[in-house]
Image (cartoon, rainbow, N blue to C red):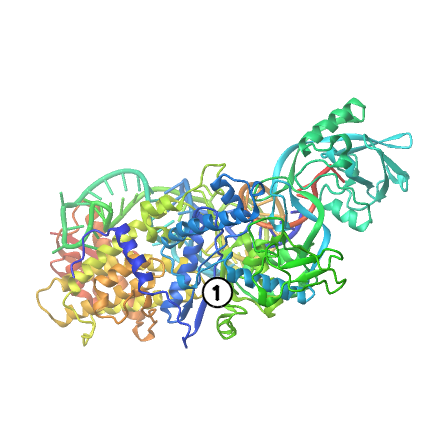
Amino acid sequence: MDIPKRYDIRAVEEKWRNWWHKEGIYSFNPKTKKKIFSLDTPPPTVSGTMHIGHAMAYSQADFIMRYHRMKGEEIFYPWGFDDNGLATERFVEKKAGVKAEDMPREEFRKLCLEQTKETEEYMLNQFLSLGISPDLNLSYRTIDKRVQRMSQLSFIEIYEMGREYRKEAPIIWCPECQTAIAQVELKDKQFSSVFNDIVFMVGSKQLIISTTRPELLPSCVAVFYHPQDKRYKNLKGKKAKVPLFDLEVPILEDKRVDMEKGTGIVMCCTFGDQTDVEWYLEHNLPLRISITKDGRMNQLAGKYQGMKIAEARKAIIKDLKASNMLVAQKPISHFVNVHERCGTEIEFLVSKQWFIRYLDLKDKFLELGRKLKWYPKHMRARYDNWVKGLRWDWCISRQRYFGIPIPVWYCAKCDAEILADKEQLPVDPLVDKPPVKQCPKCGCKEFVPERDVLDTWATSSLTPFIPAKWCEDEKFFNKIFPFSLRSNGHDIITFWLFNTIVKSYLHEKKLPWGHAMINGFVLDPHGDKMSKSKGNVVHPDTVLERFGADALRFWAASSKLGEDLPYQEKELVTGQKFLTKLWNASRFAIMHLSDYKPSVKPKRLDPVDKWILSKLQAIVKQSTDSFEVYEFSKTKQLVEDFFWHVFCDNYLEMIKWRLYSEEENEAKLSAKYTLYTVLLTLLKLIAPLLPHVTEEIYHAHFIKHEKQKSIHLCSWPKYSKALVDTTIEKHGDWVVDIIARVRKLKSMQGLSLKTELALLVLEKTKQQKLSDFEATIRHTTRARSIVYGKPKQLATERFGLKLEAKLA
RNA sequence: GGGCCCGUGGUCUAGUGGCUAUGACGUUUCCUUGACGUGGAAAAGGUCCCCAGUUCAAAUCUGGGCGGGCCCACCA
């Protein structure tokens, strides 16, 4: 076959991507008897586009899957999208220019379904353009009817276990998104603010209290000082009068008070922060909520009612000043909890929410964390750290629109919870009827449907259940579950990975996977985090356009698993150069192999061929071992180095004289046999990382002689101890050294490498060991003759070899 | 404040006790060699963050410090 001189990256990559899916190269065979290797990857959130972090993480997981496919295992590699929840709503609102609360619920849900479908098609193409190898027949969306059913079923089962409860409880509330959010959805943001020293009256005495949130004065329920604070000891049991509002609150002790901060005395409001929540619960304080769900002041705030929080703060400060109750203001800069999706400062409210009770299972979760094999190992510490720090049960209800409905109705009279029948799922309580005609508790015939939807994590924590057909096909489920591997970023260990373990434990009493591989972040070239505000975001589409998928994967393979990877364009350039080199070396080989049949084996191998075959074994062994522990970067480095420096720079040069010889003799056959074997082995070793170029080369020649229709279905190279010969390796290395030093000599003199040598003098003592290599040395260095004696020039370097070269 | 990770030529990186510290990119010089000029050959370039200790021997182990990252806690 004619092989084109240039490798057309974009055309070739697209061709194979389509072919692989059309030919079912990635198809899972449910009837398989082979060992199944399965992967649970994060279904990307439908938020518009793939980002560079995705590109790295999904490539890295794909390396592993392709390796296992070549190992001969049956690959179960599903693909999913997470397309419900807040992130999706935000995306749709922005894209369509609407606000969910301004339109009928059904209409908004319909819009979301349409928009996500469209965006998913676009995003799927982006992901596939990385050359990843999922079986698209195993695709799912978290808003699918069958996933809704599964998620609701999970809800009902956990309810039946007695682990779900609905409770009026302080919850973390985002006034912008108007929903309860979880602890994990918070992040820190630095704000400049003001410490206001406000006067509270205790009898006729003034008590100065510092606060950044004077608008919460109407919510003040107590004042605290530290039990060891002598300044305030005398106030114990007394009452303080809150300025502007006609309130008297108790003065209490608590060791959580920081004596150094402000005046060492703090007001407790329901609720300003998490400590307030804890004090409210522990000291049995009254509840005085003055902020509404949309972030405005309510009737408790009196004349400030209706104002937004920021407005109320200003107005109250103004009034405090006017009445001389504000004695000082100090500007400060502090960190505040904000909702990670919108950056809005969160509030604490009390509202009825559904929870999964799991704080009692912390020890069990820690035990499961120890059972899971983590790659890299130290990532478990993050999980442990998180589990140990858990303080709230899992709030799974969200006051949103586009999500999976909570399958519950409430008795209009006694508020009894009526759960949907399992047979009736999926269900939407707003549309569907409850499974009973009257309340089993009070007989009332009216029901109120639950309006809330499930937290998206309550569903995406089921990702190993979804493609494994949990509660749909028991036989299939038992075949697939638990999965072999979960891959995800270190940033989501604490929720996605953790929540999945929670659900898996609750339903199945075991770990959802055997191994977890944890990938790092993509950073900008200086090692800083990428962010829109810094303007240092790199888009994978542009990278793919310019360098192609294999080059991008080459870059993604250069980071050790779990390590952050700076985006360096030069690494993409290096990748492209590697592809070109691979292409050209293969072209050269194929040119010489066109009439060669691998079934014809030479009777005797040339020592140079033995040398490279022996060295290749170490590469095979180490590459295999590295892939087994998810260290694809090691494999990449080994193969890259061997291919370039051992195979191209030296081996090909050393066998040219045999390949070009007119005579079809044993020596030439030995070269061809070895060239075929070594190149095919290297192609296979690098195929998981560079699937396109290796497939193209495989089809250009090797497919004629190999059985498989794709290189990705070929068997992974096996280490052969019989081929290892350390003596030959040592002698071959001498030869390489001799050639290198002759090259250096010529280079230093500014001569072409094809300049002939009149005479090459090698050490007499090495004569016997080098005799088999003599023809190779002579041809490769272009020496007219070799003699053995006592060389005077080019003294000993690395291998204790001495030589002398005389130019012609 | 707690936990974990990291600190190697200009840049990125390999290297968990032992030969002259690996490779890539960049820089300089030379070579149009029959796979490849998107190439080849060669050269220059390193206090292995700092200090102390263990050891015959430390980039590597221990302690302390400095700097960076991520997660958690705090955030009146």
Q: Please state if A126 lies on the left or on the right of A778 as rendered.
A: right
User: Tag 1: Cα neighbours inside 10 Å, few (<14), some, or many (≥20)?
Assistant: many
Q: Which of the 4 quarters of the picture holds residue A702? A: bottom left
Foreground residue among A721 and A61: A61
Q: Is residue A98 above or below residue A17?
A: above
Q: Secondary structure at mark 1?
A: loop
- The residue sitting at 78% across, 32% down in the picture is A302
Task: Please give the residue where the numbered disc 1 appears in the rendered image.
Answer: A467
List the single residue furthest toward the left.
Answer: A662
Residue A424's spot in the image, x, y percent? 58, 65
Which quadrant would residue A18 be assigned to in this image?
Answer: bottom left
Residue A369 shows in the view? no
Residue occupying the point 43% across, 74% down: A35
Is B57 located above or below residue A294 in the figure? below
Q: Residue furthest top?
A: A322
Image quadrant of residue A802? Answer: bottom left
Residue kind at label 1, given as amino acid type? Pro
Say which residue appears at 30% left-offset and 63% top-offset.
A682
Residue A132 appears in view: yes
